[in-house]
Amino acid sequence: MNKSMGWKVALIIGILLIFLFGIFGVPSSFSGQGLLAAMQNRIHLGLDLRGGTHLILQVQVNDAVNVDSDNAIERLKTELRARKINYTEITKPDPANNPDKILIKGVPPENSSDLRSIVSDRLPEYDLTSGAENGWTVAMKAQSLTALKNQAVTQAIETIRNRIDQLGVSEPVIQEHGLGQYQILVQLPGVDDPARVKEIMQSTAMLEIRQTLGGPYPSEQAALQEHGGVLPPDAVLMKGKSIGRAGDEGAESWYLVSRSSAVTGRDLRNAEPGRDENGAPDVRFTLTGEGGRKFYAFTSAHVGDNLAVVLDNKVQESAVIKEPIRDSGVINGRFTEQEAKDLGMILRSGALPASIHYLQESTVGPSLGTDSIRAGVRAAVIGMLAVLIFMLVYYHGAGINADVALILNLIILLGFMGFTQAVLTLPGIAGVILTVGMGVDSNVLIFERIREELRNGKTPPSAVDQGFSHAWITIVDTHITTMVSAAILFIFGTGPVRGFATTLFFGLAANLFTAVFVSRVIFDYNLSRKQRGEALSIG
Amino acid sequence: MEFFKNPNFDFLGKKWYFLAFSLVFSVAGILSMLLWHGIPLGVDFRGGTLVTLKYSHRPDNNLIRAAMDEAGLKNARIQSFGNPANNEVLIDLDVQETSEQALDRGKNQIINALEAKAHAPAGKQDLNNASALTLTDYLLQKDPQHLGTDANQRYSAEAQAIVNYRDKSRGGVLASFDELKGVVDPSVVTALQDGFFLSDFGVKNVDIIGPQVGAQLRRQAVLATVYSLAGMLVYLWFRFELIYGVAAVVTVFHDTLITVGAFSLMNKPLSLTVIAAILTLIGYSNNDTIVVFDRIRENIKLLRREKLADIVNKSINQTLSRTILTAGLTFLTVLALYVFGGEVLRGFSFALVVGILIGTYSSIAIAAPILVAYQDWRSNQGKKTLVVPAEAPKRDRLKVKAKA
């Protein structure tokens, strides 16, 4: 009896030490401060306790698809022209809802096999189907479409992560959210200025260099008038930054630019804020090798023409190409110092493949977080003390078993959280309190059974035995059903609710161990020290 | 010490009283949900903008309402938040003012309107609502301490110190610039006074939920509840018999109905954490019911000669001590949460307070009578019942003797 109890006690102490390690790690010092700091390292506070910003955004994946189909249209046109195949028009009938559908009209029937080979060779992600009246529809294959959309989300996450890294936020959370809705969750602890963060994240900062075909015009109408009311087919009208002296925000300007771009943000290697000859802030950029080659080719072919530096579909500036440019340039758009710095950062971190919409924004001020921690811990301590004292009063000696089990329960629970890097939220603290209340139920079940058996005349050892074995099944049943509830909560819940589900689940698991095994060991130890016939202190 | 020494109450006999009690509360709840307060939804589920503000003095709700009207936010709901001594106010905008095109427009409108009312001097920013980033940028520009290369780092640290002092020691609102004299260099304070003023409020918390997310969360809450109930039914069917599962589900449904009814009656909003609390009390109520069912199952095997009603009564009495104790202890902890746990958890702890009382009551008053009623119905139909009738064969009598 002694030997088996020996290893049981050793097991309990071992587990105690392991989970204490889970909570504190190896603390630098054993003072109050040192322990608190060690604990804060292991157990992370959720946003509602630490303060910070929580955002849910949705990537407008159709933007990315539109970019791809625009490129596809360009490729089609080039190929058709090269093979001297006629067509009347190539359009996208519904770019908002079906961004991948392209309609080709007016291809003579004898060229249909050529068209097929073009699509299968040069547009491998697209399918060609024939439509009405000599029309053809080119649409993306379902697989490619899904892949492109998912890729847009992944790329968006990377870009956002880069931008947020540069802000210096500690432990940000940026991950895909929800099921199949192209949503991203961003959690920024300690950040209390969501407006600034959103600005930095939001800009698609799509840098493009296109050819300027006309402008600046003072208004859209003036531009149309110049061209007899109809724009040339490969030109697009774009707004420019306001002209006028610095500080004069009044006049609009419009430019006619080419539809396709010579160089895009993907060809960017670096972008830094600087100052021009007049001391005004500007942004200098350098291109990658491939980008430099493209830029050189473009500028060589268009010496004397104008190029437009386009940022987020707005013309920043239009300049004359005096000579071929290889791989570096300057953007001067009347920036403030702050804007130049931010722009450099945005350009450096790559382009967002699509624009983002915000679906949810929560900011917890740090003062609320501190208040919450204070209130939660206070409630937990009071609740726990109430239970501990009551158990002693009602069950006398056996109450000590329950109390020890409860305290061990708490240590194991917190240790679990430390080991799994789980996040503690305010409902999580409530979960701890609840675990105490529900956990003590197991002890009550066992003790009441033991009392009953004693009343029926059993000896203490037999009563303890019967008490534990009868109660065990019920304890398992009740714990499993609540753990199932907690698991479902974890799956369907977000943030704070997940924290609650976590503490509830781990608390119940820990309770299965402490209420049955640990409590039993203490009982056995007490019994082994008693004389034959001596009563059990169970109230 | 023992509360119940050998209790022998006739619980099943009182089942009509219990039914009446349950009916009264259920109907009251349903009527309130249909006709009076409806089911008050928190911002999580209906979408909208929720801004919590802390004032440095007792806030004047009329002034705030006037500011909201001027900003065009006619449907803003304004109420005091938490302990009145904290001077906190909650402003609540509907989802119409929260479009996804500009999710934070409502929030900005609120803050701008209130700052306008606080006589903001032109060109100055509000120090009580400035972020550490804004302060750092301003200090870098002004450079009051004439720092060199480490200016960014030092001013960042000072800005953070100011923000921490404001938020952690002063609850988010500074009353005067003098309070900062002990926190940072006086030259910094003077520089701040040039570019900032102090409004009389600080934003403690902002929750903006767009309509899409609101709908998603509603769907998830319903799914979670349905799956929980289904899981319970399956588990109980597996461990006991189907009727036990059905009785448990009906019981839990009754508990949920009365709890949500309580929220409707008291016009407290349902939020995500409240749903979490409701799912927890489903688990708790189920626990309770299982304990009684386990005892009933044990007693059915032991006391084959008795009527089911008597067995059930006996089982409830035997577990009464445990039931009341557990309920009491859990209730104690949840009460501590409700009283001391702070305003943020108020809805959550209220759900648990009501839920634990009802959950305990329902195991005795609803689940057990359903078992017996089903039994009676089946025996009236002449079908096989849960308990073998009084004339037990000789074999069983021998078995019973050996056990005793």
Image (cartoon, rainbow, N blue to C red):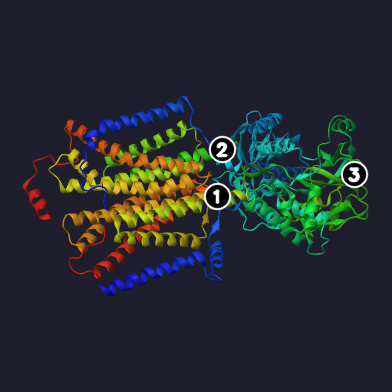
Residue A465 placed where, x, y %?
23, 61
Q: Is label 2 in a helix, a strand or a loop?
A: helix
Judging by the rendered image, the residue that carries numbered circle 2 is B43
Q: Is label 1 in a helix, a strand or a loop?
A: helix
Q: Chain letter for mark 3, please.
A: A
Amino acid carrying mark 1 in the image: Ser
Q: How far apart are marks 3 and 2 (CA)?
A: 44 Å
**Which mark lies nearer to you, 3 or 2?**
2
**Which mark lies nearer to you, 1 or 2?**
1
User: Residue sitting at 30 percent across and 31 percent down?
Assistant: B19
Q: How many neighbours does mark 1 have within 10 angstroms: few (below 14), some (14-19), or many (20 or more)?
A: many
Q: How far apart are marks 1 and 2 (CA)?
A: 19 Å
Residue B31 placed where, x, y %?
42, 26
> Which of the labelled discs sits on residue A246, or is there none?
3
Q: Is label 3 in a helix, a strand or a loop?
A: loop
Amino acid carrying mark 2 in the image: Val
Judging by the rendered image, the residue that carries numbered circle 1 is A372
User: Between A121 and A113, which is closer to the camera in this rendering?
Assistant: A121
Q: For this view, does A9 lie left or right of residue B87?
A: left
